[in-house]
Amino acid sequence: MRKLQEKNTRKLVRLGKTSLAVTLPVEMTHELGWKEKQKVVAKKVRGGILIKDWKK
């Protein structure tokens, strides 16, 4: 079994000409209750990116 850190290490993939995407571990999305095609907000923060649920 892969170590947890290796399991959660992901690569950026090209999505079209101008976008990049990263996959999320399915276990994390289940824990958060996130579904396919759900809207999320990506915010640049010191040292990385914060991704959270989109609220009206």
Image (cartoon, grey):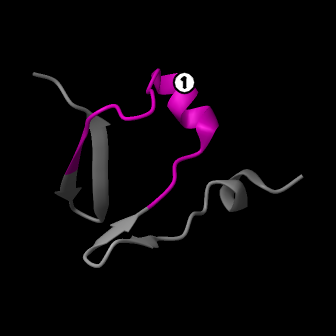
Q: Is residue 36 above or below residue 49?
A: above
Q: Foreground residue, 4 or 53? A: 53
Q: Is residue 51 above or below residue 38?
A: below
Disc 1 residue type? Answer: Glu
Give the side of residue 20 with respect to residue 41, left or right. Answer: right
Kindly give the residue lying farthest to the left in the view shown. 56
Q: Foreground residue, 56 or 5? A: 56
Count of numbered circles on the image: 1
Kindly give the residue lying farthest to the right in the view shown. 1
Q: Foreground residue, 5 or 29? A: 29
Q: Secondary structure at mark 1?
A: helix
Magenta-colored span: 22-42
Which of the 4 image quarters holds residue 56?
top left
Q: Residue at x 29, y 79 (%)?
A: 17
Give the side of residue 36 with respect to residue 16, left or right. Answer: right
Could you classify mark 1 by the number of other residues whose Cα lies within 10 Å: few (under 14), some (14-19), or many (20 or more)? Answer: few
Q: Position of residue 42 (x, y in %)?
A: 23, 49
Kindly give the residue lying farthest to the bottom in the view shown. 17
Q: Residue at x 57, y 64 (%)?
A: 10
26 part of magenta stretch? yes
Which of the 4 image quarters holds residue 36?
top left
Q: Residue at x 70, y 62 (%)?
A: 6
Q: Is residue 1 above or below residue 17?
A: above
Q: Position of residue 19 (x, y in %)?
A: 29, 70
Q: Which residue is mark 1?
A: 31
Q: Residue at x 72, y 51 (%)?
A: 4
Q: Is residue 23 above or below residue 54?
A: below
